[in-house]
Amino acid sequence: MAKQRFSPIHIPKDTKIKMTGSQVEIQGPLGKLQMVLSSRVLVEQNEDTLLVKNRDNSKTAAAQQGTMRSLITNMIKGVTKGYEKVLIIQGTGYRAQMAGSGLQLFLGYAKPVSISLPQSITCDLQVIKSADKGDLTYIKLKGIDKQLVGDMAALIRKTKSPDPYKHKGVRYSNEVIRKKVGKRAIVQG
C-alpha cells in the first residue's frame, strides 16, 4: 500500500483551537463551534496548521479522516467568514415577514406557515418589485454553522416547492427552474 499524504488545514491568526480528548472547539471572531471527533481519527496541531490523520489503514478510517477534515475546515470557515443562503419567494400574494424570533410565510395556504429560527441564525428580508415577475421577496439566512444554515434553508424551501409551470413558490437564488409548457399550449401549437 502506498504511503498516504494528508493535506494540512491552515488556521487563521484570529482563530483559536482547543483540543480536549475527542472533542475539538474552534473559536473565531464570529463565534464558537464544537464537535466530537471520530475514534478512528487523530488530530495533530502545530503553530498555524492542523493535520487530520487516520489511526489505521482501513477503508472506514480513511473515509472518517476525509469527513472529519472537511468538517473541521467548514467550522474554521464558519467562525471566520460565516455562511449565507439566499432564497427567493415568487408569486402573486406570496410574501414573508418576521414574527418575533421566527419567520411567517404567506404562500397561498389558508393560514401562514410559521418557522422558528435558531438564535445562531440571522434572517434578513428584502422585497424587490419587478414588472415582469411581480414582487420578489429575498430571504437571507446567515450563520456560522454550515449544516444548520443549509437545513433551515431547505426547511423554508420545502414549505412551497417551486412550480415548473408558473414559477411560483420558494427557490434558492442560484437555482434554475426550467419552465414547462402546459397542455393548452401544446394542443394549440
Image (cartoon, grey):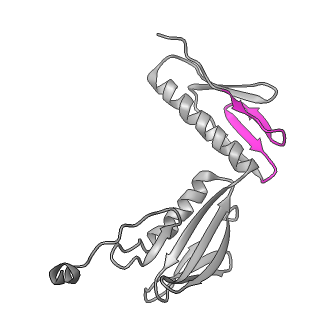
Please tell me in which quadrant of the rendered image residue 67 appears: top right
Considering every residue shown, the one lying at the far front of the view is: 189
Q: Position of residue 45 (x, y in %)?
A: 75, 26
How many marks the image carries: the answer is 0
Q: Position of residue 177 (x, y in %)?
A: 40, 67
**Residue drawn where x is 56% and y is 25% of the image:** 40
Q: Position of residue 43 (x, y in %)?
A: 67, 26
**Residue drawn where x is 47% and y is 19% of the image:** 58
Magenta residues, as a range? 8-30
**Residue drawn where x is 74% and y is 33% of the image:** 20
User: Left or right: 154 with respect to 187?
Assistant: right
- Nearer the observer, 86 or 112: 86
Residue 29 within the magenta-colored segment of the rendering: yes
| Residue 117 can be seen, yes or no | no
- Nearer the observer, 4 or 120: 4
Please tell me in which quadrant of the rendered image residue 124 appears: bottom right
- Nearer the observer, 59 or 173: 173
